Amino acid sequence: MDVIVYQCSLRWSPSQGVVEILSQASLVEKIARSKCFEWFSCCIIVLNSIFIGWHTQVLATGAIQRANANLQPEMEVDGGIVLIQGLFTSLFISELCIRWAAEGLKDFWMSNDVGWNLLDLLCCVIGLLDVSVELVIRNTGRLDEGNPLRGVTVVRVLRIVRIVRVVRVIRIMKFFKELRMMIFSTLNSLQSVVWIFFFLFVLFYMFGIAFTSSVVNFLDTLERRQDPAYSSLLKYFGSLDVSILTLYMSMTGGQNWGVFYEALKTVPGGEVSCILFILYVTFALFAVVNIVTGVFVDTALQSSKDDREVAVQDEVEHKKSYLNHLRELFEAIDVSAEGMISRDTLQHAFKHETIVAYFNSLKIDAPDAKTLFDLLDYDQSGEIDLEEFLHGCYSLHGDASHLEAKILQMEVRFVKEMLMQLMDDFQDLRKRRLRRPSTDRVDKGDRSHTSKGLH
């Protein structure tokens, strides 16, 4: 979609408007950018996801019922199911072709959504294979033991991949902002998850070696290993892999860590191991868990900032809400409901603490009514209409941005250069006027000399 807008911007000139730009787009581009097309894509994705879940449940329920009746699972494919699958596959292929044609054959694979485009293409290919296999199965009949198609389980497993298309709904639908942010935060945190797993493995590995070595050194005789009193030691700390699993369960709540503590207490003189285990549990539950949670929270916050659609939507919603508050403030000041605010009306409104507090809540620092009116009255008409009020107050709220500071710096430099040029022109003019009297005296002397010669 961004590529389409960029392509249109290449054909834009300052004399063109939005309507003319949209008219230059082809019919396919208009369809791909329309809200109806987005809703169409969303609907077929949701319906297909529901259909896949329903079909899976029907197959599972049927298999259970036939197993209870001592019957072999029914592998025949219903013709209606194949027809619906083919319909969904055709719709998905059509939707993919429209977007492909709208963005261009090359730009389609170079856009920011190339990952989603590859997923859509993969799902379409899987859909075609799935329908083809279902048709072959239906024409072949039951899948007996000797049927070569009975081993074609890969395609049936790949059918599950199509359910991943439901994630695309979250990217299309704007009102799924929170859910979309959660999913993208999870995906973006995969790199952090790898390092978290590595850190946890090192932690379990170090403590696992300590506990396993302690148990192995204690159970150094056959009698002790066969003693039922020490069976829990062998069960939970008998080998390194078992110790790592035990430490993982004690941290995640797979089993109460008190059970493992009681097992370590059976070792005579094993107070050191018990204290070490208590330290491990304390460190794992109060330090490691909080650190891991903090990493995920930080990744989620960073993902919400990096998600362009979320940032744009938040900015649009914030501006819309702010302008609505400004309209309410304008109506509160314009008590006569004339749609215009005069200087006297604004000064009268500033006598009420509620109006002043409303301005402060909107981050508009107005020292007095006169200064604010001069800033808002852009056309110097003596009255402020709603458009001037909204535009002026929105530009005044908050602190000055870096761009505004640069613009002000540029304007000051421009004024300084104009003043320097004006001073140079003034100096040139002054020098000319200083030279003019001497020139006039020379001209008078020449004229007097000429007149004497004539006499």
Image (cartoon, rainbow, N blue to C red):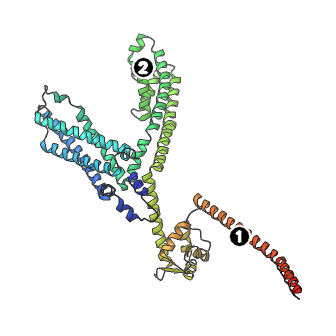
Residue 85, given in percent of the width and then of the height, sits at 19, 44
Q: Which residue is mark 1?
A: 422
Q: Residue at 45% of width from left, 27% of height from top?
A: 261
Could you say which quadrant of the image residue 55 lies in?
Answer: top left
**Element at badge 1?**
helix
Query: Is residue 142 something one can see in this rendering?
Result: yes
The amino acid type of the residue labelled 1 equals Leu
Q: Is residue 80 above or below residue 217?
A: below
Residue 245, given in percent of the width and then of the height, sits at 41, 27
Q: Residue at 41% of width from left, 33% of height from top?
A: 256
Asked whether 428 or 385 is in front, the reply is: 428
Q: Which residue is mark 2?
A: 239
Asked whether 450 or 201 is in front, the reply is: 450
The amino acid type of the residue labelled 2 equals Ser
Q: Alpha-carbon neighbours of circle 2 within 10 Å: few (<14), some, or many (≥20)?
A: some
Query: Is 346 placed left or right of 145 in the picture?
Result: right
Could you say which quadrant of the image residue 36 lies in?
Answer: bottom left
Q: Is residue 398 above or below residue 131?
A: below
Quarter of the C terminus within the rendering = bottom right
Q: Residue at 38% of width from left, 50% of height from top?
A: 179
Residue 78, given in percent of the width and then of the height, sits at 13, 41
Residue 97, disc: none
Could you say which quadrant of the image residue 357 lies in?
Answer: bottom right
Query: Is 212 placed left or right of 144 in the picture?
Result: right
